Amino acid sequence: MKNERLFLTSSFEDQEENPPKDVRGIFYKYLHRWPLFVISFAIAIGIAWFYVKNIKPVYDIKAKLAVKDDTKADNAKEALAEIDLAGQSKDIETELEMIKSRPLIREVVNNLQLWTSYRETDAYKSRDIYVSTPVTFKLIRSGGSALKEQTLSIVIKDTSSFTIKTENSESQPYEFNKTLTNSIGTWQLVKTPYFKDYIGRTVNIGLQNPEDVVTMYQNGVVVSLNKEAPIIEMELEDEIPERGKQFLTQLIKVYKISSIEDKNKVTQSTIKFIDDRLSSVAGELNSVEKDVEGFKSSNGLTDISSKSKFYLDNVQSNDVRLNDVNVQLNVIEGIERYVNSSSNSESVPATLGISDPTLTSLVDQLSKLQLQRDRMLATTPEQNPIFEPLNRQIRSIKTSIKETIAGIKQSLTSVQRELKNNNSGFEASIKNIPGQERQYVGFKRHQGIKENLYIYLLQKREELSLSYASTITSIRTIEEPYYVSPKSKKQVPYVLAFLLGLGIPASLIYGLEVLKNKVINRTEIEKATGAQIIGELIQQKDKDNIIVVLDKEASAIGEQFRALRTNLQILFNEQQSGRVTMFTSSIAGEGKSFVTSNMGVALAATSRRVVILELDMRRPKISSIFKLSETHPGMSEFLKGEKQLNEIVQPSGVHANLSIVGAGAIPENPSELLDSFMLDKAIQQLRTEYDDILIDTPPLHLVTDAMILSRVCNVTLYLVKQGYTDKSELKFIKQTVKENKLPNLNIIFNGIQRTKYGYGYKYDGSYYSERKVKKIRA
């Protein structure tokens, strides 16, 4: 017979490269472990119930602010346009970060003393009594560098005293409103209007590090921008809605004050510049006035001629313009000195009298960046890398300011030169006036210059002072902090409990299967080995009833053996007698002896003469399956030459066409005996007497006996057991097939458990049971 591979189909499941998942089988696999799901559900629902029972409602506190763009100045600010008080626009994205900045949050936390909490424990429950606390903790001076997290248990004894309760004792009485000093620092307890309701009760005062509380609120406050309008929305969650409202109210207040202070910094810088100039000009004006008064007194002058007055008026008008140019040049030089300085710690100079919009805009941007840098310096060291982008922007704007100043300075210098030339012409004309009048015009001219400059500076200072005194923030509260009743979230824990109660055991079952690394379905075998699966056998539950082919109550597995018999017939093609089939596997316990015995009975039932050779001489089982004497001579005696072949053949006692050749006495060298020519002689003789010779062999991956026996076999049936055979054994089978070590190797997938592994058959074997046949006939 040619040793060729035939591709067979199973009677129980279609052969497909990617067979559809058996959803029903998977369901049964998990249903098989229903107690695990019941326990998991019970625990999950219990935890959810306990959580819902003790959960405290969380309120959502909200508020809205409108930030006005200062570039759209109203009429009241037009008077300050020259000194650029209304030229700074709000960058709303920056304002969002400003609201959540640590300095502002820290100020709110300290103002409201949010680093203290007040709780009362009652019936194993702790409730927050922030709103109705009987006392307020006032820390006068901290006892260390930072306040440590701790709890003070205060027992209110009467209207005037309290004690501090510890685990083992209770302190002496202390009076309210009296200063105390201990490890915390210097502090006192102040009574509140709710004090009388708590006499005789215990209040737990929790103390936290203020910086930790600042971080908590900084992460808890949600500040977002409404894209449709410049509206800032603020949101905070808190168990105590009143505390949340107070926090947002105070945060808005502190933010507005901070915005006003930022504006006033620019105003203060400009006022300082004007005050310095006024002081200098006032002294010069007094000196000039004294000179005029002295000249008139000494020379007895009461009036000057109309010609002198004409020249004087023209000179004074020209000097006013020249003075304005000089002021602008002075401001430009101040800005130039600032941008050329390497330090970023100085205040940005004012743009008094500068009408160039480009320079004004650049100075505004520089001022905002400098203010932002100053805020960051309050909480972050200057060496921190986060300053690098900001310093880079400041350097870039300073470069742009330098370029703009160069052009403006050149233009102002040109105008200054022209005005000076005009003065030279007027002065030449004045020289033609008589001496006393000419001297008087010169004195009067200097007096007019100083008067005009003094009046101009005085006017600007008054405007600035008025603005500084009545600075109004551009931030407006649209909606005061408010809260609504919290929505019920009790269904969420139960939904999570349901999902966890279902998911945890399912994941556990799946994970255990993955960790076990056992073969579960035929697709794994076919893909890993490339070998054909000739048949599939379900798990036999009754271990005492091993011969199942003739058992009518086990008709499903009986039909599977009959299908395997048919497939074996196709595998041998036209050969009808002298067929030698070897049964082997990778490891022990995969059902070789069980399958060999039942296949022998199944073949004998078709009037074929069958003999089973028990050649697993290390752990023989065939004789015990057929309940034959284990002391009867067997193959070991024959191979040693002690017995003849006809002396070791026994009837099976199960079927007349089935004979058994036992292993005999267990030899010391089974591999050497199987390799002798006596085995070939026995097989040759048995081929002439029997139609089928079935050989039960030891596990191939443990010993080489099956490899030795392959020389006398036509077909090898290799057993793989579901949930028992390790997936690593599939590589061994693949290597065996690739190297063609065993003749015509086909696989039997044994021990399939539908409910346990979710892998079953579309075939209902019970259709052939005697009981069901009777029902059908009826």
Image (cartoon, helix red, strand yellow):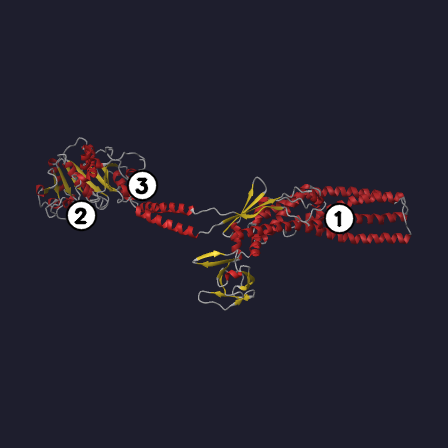
| Rendering quarter of residue 530 | top left
Q: Is mark 1 on a helix, strand or loop?
A: helix
Amino acid type, label 1: Gln
- Pointer 1 local density, CA inside 10 Å: few below 14, some 14–19, many at least 20: few
Quick check: 43 left or right of 14?
right
Quick check: 521 left or right of 187?
left
- Camera-nearest label, 1 or 3: 3
Image location of residue 300, percent across then percent down:
91, 52
Q: Is residue 72 visible?
A: yes
Quick check: 166 left or right of 556?
right
Query: How many discs appear?
Result: 3
- Pointer 3 local density, CA inside 10 Å: few below 14, some 14–19, many at least 20: some
| Rendering quarter of residue 363 | top right
Residue depicted at x 19% and y 45%: 543
Q: Could you tell which of marks 1 and 3 lies nearer the N-terminus? A: 3
Q: Could you tell which of marks 2 and 3 lies nearer the N-terminus? A: 3
Q: Which residue is tagged 3?
A: 27
Q: Which residue is tagged 2?
A: 619
**Looking at the picture, does residue 570 appear above or below residue 623?**
above
